[in-house]
Image (tube, rainbow, N blue to C red):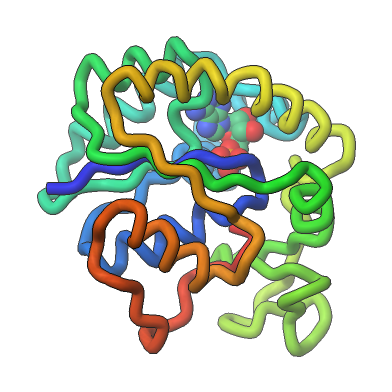
Amino acid sequence: MRKYVIMGVQGSGKGTQSQLLSADLDIVHISVGDIFRWNVQNHTKMGAYVRRTMAAGELVSDDLVESVVRDRLTGHDWNYGFIIDGFPRNRAQAEFFLESYDIDGVIVLDLPDSEVRRRVLNRRVCQNCGMNYNLLDNSPTVPGQCDMCGAELATREDDTEEALAVRLRDYHEKTNPVLDVFRRKEYVITVDARPAPEVVQADIREQLGLPPFKSDGPAPEGSAVA
Ligand code: AMP
């Protein structure tokens, strides 16, 4: 059983790297942000509550996040392990998490703010299948339309200059305390997130002592900006 946490600011490729790792190791990818987005799209009670918070780039309350994570992990479809993305985001969440789970590795994707801005402000997401595009490096064949399913592409509601500035500030303020908590017990690796996704994946595996990445498999769902 393998249990990993992946951390990094928006646009650092957490989703893409998690998918590459989870598909190969047969572990479950849990994205807390995706769980919230699902609730917003499906107009649940929780969705109504978190929508504005997310759109402003602010963090949802620890109590709610912790109960979402607890529910998801007690669902137990992760016999071979999991990789959790977007959690923990602050010291309180990290301490809550470590009370219940031993983690085998914490992967930190490191990306300069200037590159984050470039990736996030050019990100487009398929409204239907969730595929990510980047208008600079990975644009769809037909502008505004998903290559996979043909549905319309949109900008994430929180991918604006204002929300990004809040998220970057929050990330920098809160990440180091989280890493301090993890470093006390866990194995933390830092990976340069600037190269192509396959290169980043190879680096993650080497640092975690996992078998090498074979890039001939199916393309990951989403792209370098997930
Ligand atoms: P993400 O896709 O990880 O960027 O998450 C999108 C949004 O969901 C964030 O901007 C927050 O509003 C909320 N969110 C996701 N994970 C957390 C967390 N661990 N703590 C608080 N809010 C979160």
Residue at image point 49% right, 70% down: 221
224 is higher (above) or lower (below) than 209: below
Residue 202 vs residue 75, the one in the foreground = 202
84 sits left or right of 38 in the view: left
Residue at image point 80% right, 75% down: 144
Residue at image point 65% right, 44% down: 10
Measuring from the top left, give residue 2's x and y in whole percent.
Answer: 19, 47
| Residue 46 visible (yes or no) | no
56 sits left or right of 213 in the view: right
Where residue 112 sits, quadrant-wise, is top right
69 is higher (above) or lower (below) than 140: above
Where residue 158 sits, quadrant-wise, is top right
Measuring from the top left, give residue 75's x and y in whole percent.
Answer: 20, 38
From the image, which quarter does the C terminus lie in? bottom right
Measuring from the top left, give residue 97's x and y in whole percent.
Answer: 31, 21
8 sits left or right of 202 in the view: right
Residue 157 vs residue 28, the one in the foreground = 28
Measuring from the top left, give residue 204's x and y in whole percent.
Answer: 40, 57
Quadrant where ligand 1 appears: top right
Residue at image point 49% right, 44% down: 190
